[in-house]
Image (tube, rainbow, N blue to C red):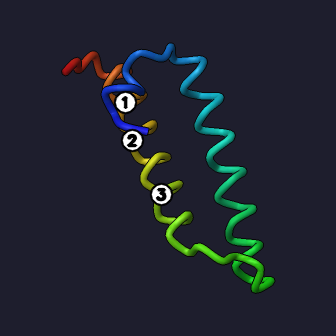
């Protein structure tokens, strides 16, 4: 999801999305270890989504708006 789209969500929604993304990343890593993951790029996509969400939450915490 793009950062512009994430800006529209509330802090609570972003926090929930962050938790869900972390769970998804854990599941993907588990599948990778079990040799069941077919598309390895999913891990990168989820990690980038987590970074985007954390960046937006931190920016709001500091009062920075784009």
Q: Which residue is mark 2?
A: 52
The circle drawn on residue 9 is: none
Q: Residue furthest front?
A: 38
Q: Could you say which quadrant of the image residue 64 lies in?
A: top left
Q: Which residue is mark 3?
A: 45
Q: Few, some or many C-alpha atoms within 10 Å of disc 3 (few <14, some 14-19, many ≥20)?
A: few
Q: How far apart, in angstroms, are the residues tagged by discs 1 and 3?
A: 17 Å
The residue drawn where x is 42% and y is 47% is: 51
Label whose residue precedes the other's in the sequence (3 or 2): 3
Q: Secondary structure at mark 2?
A: helix
The residue drawn where x is 68% and y is 40% is: 20
Residue 56 is situated, as x and y percent measured from the top left of the image, at 37, 30
Q: Is residue 52 above or below residue 12?
A: below
Residue 26 is situated, as x and y percent measured from the top left of the image, at 71, 61
Q: Is residue 49 left or right of residue 19?
A: left
Point out the image quarter for the C terminus.
top left
Q: Residue furthest left?
A: 66
Instruction: Pick the residue in front: 34 or 56.
Output: 34
Q: Is residue 36 left or right of residue 13?
A: right
The residue drawn where x is 64% and y is 58% is: 25
Q: Is residue 46 above or below residue 19?
A: below
Q: Which residue is mark 1?
A: 56
Pointers 1 and 2 in contact (C-beta within 8 Å): yes
């Amino acid at each position: 999801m793009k950062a512009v789209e994430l800006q529209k969500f509330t802090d609570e929604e972003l926090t929930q999305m962050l938790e869900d993304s972390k769970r998804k990343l854990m599941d993907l890593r588990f599948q990778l270890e079990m040799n069941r993951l077919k598309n390895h790029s999913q891990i990168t996509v989820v990690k980038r989504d987590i970074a985007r969400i954390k960046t937006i939450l931190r920016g709001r915490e500091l009062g920075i708006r784009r």
